[in-house]
Amino acid sequence: MSQQQSADNVSIDDIPVDIANTQSGDVDPTDVPDEIESITRGLAGEHPPTNPLVVLKAARWWYIHGKGGTDPAFQWAIEWTRHLATNTPSDVERFDQFLEYLVTVGFADERHELR
């Protein structure tokens, strides 16, 4: 019923968590699981996800593998979840930082390619 997991590689919701690379701040786009990449790209797109649980799944991954609480992808996912939960406008500056971060990480060469 439970899977064998080593101490340095665990999974949550079938998304692997590489303990050795937690909060390293150095994210290689090839290391981002397909599901998290899809959610992240969706958050940058014209029609972002509307299920807060899906968005929080991506937030968790970016928190663990990115820069922790200061990771722009994590911060935007939390901001978008807040927007979904409260129906209040989201922070445009935080969204711009998120897009710039995705370019820096290597998801796209230019911000406009993400939209």
Image (cartoon, grey):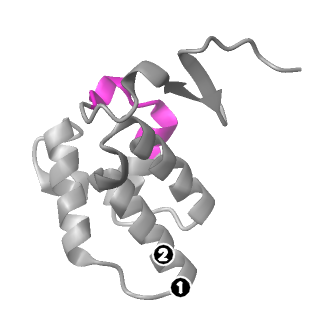
Q: Nearer the viewer, residue 110 or 31?
A: 31
Residue 110 position within the rendered picture, expressed as x and y whole percent measured from the top left: 10, 48
* Secondary structure at numbered mark 1: helix
Residue 82 disc label: 2
Residue 22 position within the rendered picture, expressed as x and y whole percent measured from the top left: 40, 30
Residue 86 disc label: 1
Q: Nearer the viewer, residue 36 or 17?
A: 17
Say which residue appears at 49% left-offset and 69% top-offset.
81
Q: Is residue 9 above or below residue 44?
A: above
Quadrant of image for the C terminus: bottom left
Say which residue appears at 54% left-offset and 68% top-offset.
50
- Residue 113, visible in the rendered structure: no
Residue 37, magenta (yes or no): yes
Which residue sits furthest bottom?
88
Mark 2 closeness class: few <14, some 14–19, many ≥20 residues within 10 Å: some
Looking at the rendering, the stretch of residues picked out in magenta corresponds to 27-38
Q: Nearer the viewer, residue 62 or 95?
A: 62
Mark 1 closeness class: few <14, some 14–19, many ≥20 residues within 10 Å: few
Residue 57 position within the rendered picture, expressed as x and y whole percent measured from the top left: 55, 49
Q: Look at label 2 and name its amino acid.
A: Arg
Dominant secondary structure of the residues highlighted in magenta in the image: helix
Quadrant of image for the N terminus: top right
Q: Is residue 22 left or right of residue 3?
A: left
Which residue sits furthest front?
7
Give the CA separation, mark 1 to mark 2.
6 Å
Q: Nearer the viewer, residue 75 or 53?
A: 75
